[in-house]
């Protein structure tokens, strides 16, 4: 690389922190998933020291990864033949998951972060297990035209993933994002999201995290109290899966900051949804 594109600030920095959790899980003999590339991202940047809440949330990052891995497998089995990773970050599912023949994965994210990712994967000689296309875009701006120009087919069912993004956007930006996704979603499309409610942002354990995020330009800007209702308003039928259920399913302890017995009403939402109606007319902006 002739310029330093390492993701050491802003929301991109959090992608490295999540990669650290994936690398740690990959090294376990009882790992819930394999990610042979996560450590390469960490090595390229250097280990980022996280606050106590970050360490407490490592179990959430692991369960979240397995949850969305399984969701993608189910979406492909249900008939989706393309996927869009919205704010793909250092996600390597296009490389580490087994996809059906002819499956296409589109990854959308900022040019700098994508350049770093491509460089690291290039050094590793990584080859995708599907047809993979990177789309460079700021998701707060118009991005649908770039996705369509990259070969995305809005007429077929699509699996959309919005992981680790929505809390960093303003509520209006999230609504706009949902409208744009909806405008490109054929009946039978699937959507998976992650978000938090207001009570979660008020947890005392997160005070140091919020301060650090503000310093690196990655403050949380929105919350969501009723993900099922919000998604219904955008044309999706949604289901919420608690981390306690995932932990029991995989024989892991419930992550402390998502355990209702410890955090009360605070929630880190993991949600999947299905679109059963035709997409609305695309918005003009």
Image (cartoon, rainbow, N blue to C red):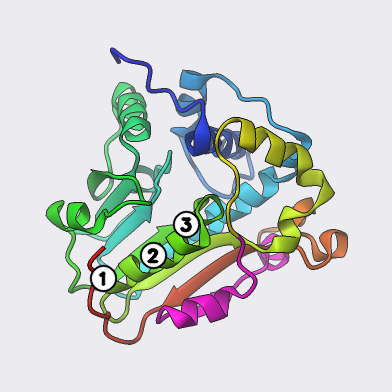
Which mark, residue 283? 1
Q: Assess whether mark 2 and mark 1 are in contact (beta carbons under 8 angstroms).
A: yes
Tell me the residue that label 2 is attached to.
176
Give the residue displayed 28% in from the left and 47% down from the top. Answer: 129
Up-down relation of residue 127 to residue 269 (above or below): above
Q: Which of 214 and 70 is in front in this view?
A: 214
Q: Which of marks 3 and 2 is in front?
A: 2
Within 10 angstroms of label 2, few (less than 14), some, or many (20 or more) residues? some
- Residue range highlighted in magenta: 223-249
* Whole-percent x, y for residue 33 in the image: 53, 48
Q: Residue furthest bottom?
A: 277
Task: For marks 3 and 2, give the CA distance.
Answer: 26 Å
* Left or right: 234 in relation to 141: right
Q: Which of marks 3 and 2 is nearer the N terminus?
A: 3
- Residue 240, quarter of picture: bottom right
Q: Assess whether mark 2 and mark 3 are in contact (beta carbons under 8 angstroms).
A: no
Q: Nearer the viewer, residue 202 or 161?
A: 202
Q: What element carries label 3?
A: helix
* Whole-percent x, y for residue 215 in the image: 62, 31
Tell me the residue that label 3 is attached to.
69
* Whole-percent x, y for residue 34 in the image: 50, 43
Give the residue displayed 58% in from the left and 33% down from the top. Answer: 20
* Left or right: 154 in relation to 34: left
- Residue 176, quarter of picture: bottom left
- Residue 206, quarter of picture: top right
Question: Is residue 241 in the magenta section?
Answer: yes
* Left or right: 53 in relation to 223: right
Quadrant (top left, top right, bottom left, bottom right) of the C terminus: bottom left
Q: Which of marks 1 and 2 is nearer the N terminus?
A: 2
Q: What element carries label 2?
A: helix
């Amino acid at each position: 690389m002739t310029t330093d594109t390492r993701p050491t600030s802003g929301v991109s920095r959090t992608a490295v922190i999540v990669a650290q959790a994936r690398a740690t899980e990959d090294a376990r003999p009882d790992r819930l998933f394999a990610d042979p590339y996560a450590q390469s991202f960490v090595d390229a940047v250097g280990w980022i020291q996280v606050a106590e809440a970050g360490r407490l949330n490592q179990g959430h990052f692991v369960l979240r990864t397995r949850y969305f891995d399984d969701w993608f497998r189910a979406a492909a089995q249900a008939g989706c033949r393309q996927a869009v990773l919205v704010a793909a970050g250092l996600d390597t599912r296009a490389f580490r998951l087994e996809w059906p023949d002819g499956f296409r994965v589109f990854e959308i994210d900022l040019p700098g972060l994508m350049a770093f990712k491509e460089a690291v994967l290039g050094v590793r000689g990584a080859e995708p297990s599907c047809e993979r296309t990177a789309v460079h875009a700021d998701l707060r701006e118009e991005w649908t035209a770039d996705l369509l120009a990259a070969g995305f087919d809005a007429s077929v069912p699509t699996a959309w993933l919005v992981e680790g993004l929505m809390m960093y956007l303003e509520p209006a930006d999230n609504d706009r994002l949902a409208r744009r996704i909806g405008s490109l979603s054929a009946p039978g499309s699937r959507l998976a999201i992650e978000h938090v409610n207001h009570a979660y942002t008020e947890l005392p354990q997160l005070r140091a995290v919020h301060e650090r995020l503000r310093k690196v330009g990655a403050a949380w800007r929105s919350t969501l109290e009723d993900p099922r209702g919000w998604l219904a308003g955008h044309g999706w039928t949604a289901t919420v899966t608690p981390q306690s259920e995932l932990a029991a399913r995989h024989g892991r302890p419930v992550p402390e900051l998502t355990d209702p017995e410890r955090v009360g009403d605070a929630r880190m939402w993991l949600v999947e949804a299905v679109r059963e109606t035709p997409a609305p007319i695309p918005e003009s902006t």
